[in-house]
Amino acid sequence: MEMLEAKYYEKLSDERVKCRLCPAECLIRPSKQGICMIRSNIDGVLYAAEYGHTVAVNIDPIEKKPLYHFKPGSEILSIGPNGCNFACVFCQNWSISQVKSQSRYISPSDLVKLARAEGSVGVAFTYTEPLIWFEYVYDASRLLRDSGLVSVIVSNGYINEQPARELFPYIDAANFDLKSIRPDFYRKICKGKLEDVQRTIRVAGEIGVHVELTNLLIPGMNDTDEEISELVDWVSALDSSTVLHLSRYFPNYNLDTPATTPERLIFAYNTAKKKLKYVYAGNITGIGKPGTACAACGADLILRDGYNVSPVGLDGRRCVGCGHESDIVI
């Protein structure tokens, strides 16, 4: 394919450019790349150098994203770019987000064909950070929408508001990783800013994207009683029906802190359940109910056993027992 000029950047003197896609707003010299590794300055023009180049292609249960209230029980074609605009020391996918990896090119039209051939409900842009892949996700999501297929992003939410508002009308669902409720955590650990992630989450909800959130509990870094309570308060202020996935951390990449204890995850789960209707524990079994119950009457709406999913109590979005309308997208 030909090189595609990137959107959202500014040309400066001496063939330098300033990327305006994400809040990092990298100042990029000729022949250099932004921190994301995939936006490159070539002779004073910023290019989406890895447009359509994916490091992974898989069919996954949609619950693996994790999305529990969007197309439950379905499978989704999942792909992702090589790079990220964060530098988290605990990254679970560091081998494809923090270092250069082998990739293959899939055009937007071929992506739609592949999704159809695999019987997928659509495409999940995931694994690394899909928002740095802006031009490709934008083009592909529009084609997917026209083809009756859905687009999902699994993202750190680190994008400027203008590009977010351009892209999100074509995104059907998102799981945003809300890594901490403390600005210091984002600044020191991720090399980013909390307020920009929070703004992205609000904008997505405002536009009508189905939003679920994930928080990875890391011992000694974001798991104090106070931090957990503050995070739950912020999520509940968005909407008490917001789905929150609390996930167990395991050592990876440059962090060898021992794994999250079950006791800490139990505390976080119980704290969240006081204010949120839908809370799930991930990377661990035996905490809370993996299924989904009606928020009004408590009847089972969806049963889950691992990735075996059975919608048992739904008539469309409504509870068969009491008629209460859930936010689950069938």
Image (cartoon, helix red, strand yellow):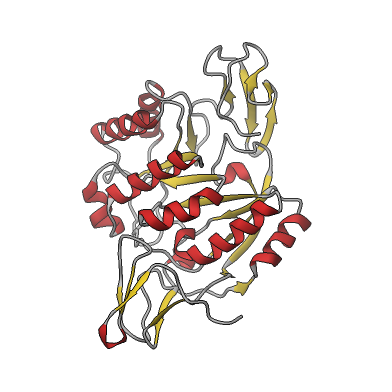
Q: Which of 141 and 76 is in front in this view?
A: 141
* Quadrant assignment for the C terminus: top right
Residue 216 vertical position relative to residue 275 in the rendered view, above or below: below
Give 105 or 57, whichever is nearer the viewer. Answer: 105
Query: Where does residue 33 sit, x and y in percent of width and height?
Result: 38, 77
Taking the spot 68% from the left edge, 38% from the top edge, the residue there is 73
Nearest to the observer: residue 216 or residue 115: 115
Q: Where is 248 relative to 31, above or below?
A: above
- The quadrant where residue 109 appears: bottom right
* The N terminus, quarter of image: bottom right
* Residue shown at the point (49%, 65%) measured from the top left: 133
Outermost residue, left direction? 184
Residue, x 52% and y 74% (percent of image)?
A: 50
Left/right of residue 9 with respect to residue 152 in the rendered view: left
| Residue depicted at x 54% and y 43% | 66
Question: Viewed as shown, does residue 169 lie left or right of 257?
Answer: right
Q: x, y percentage for residue 295?
A: 52, 18
Expressed as whole percent of the image width and height from the top left, the position of residue 251 reads 40, 53
Residue 327 in view: yes
Is 117 placed above or below 72 here?
below
Residue 59 in sight from this viewpoint: no
Q: How many labels does the image show?
A: 0
Check the image and report above or below for 141 versus 291.
below
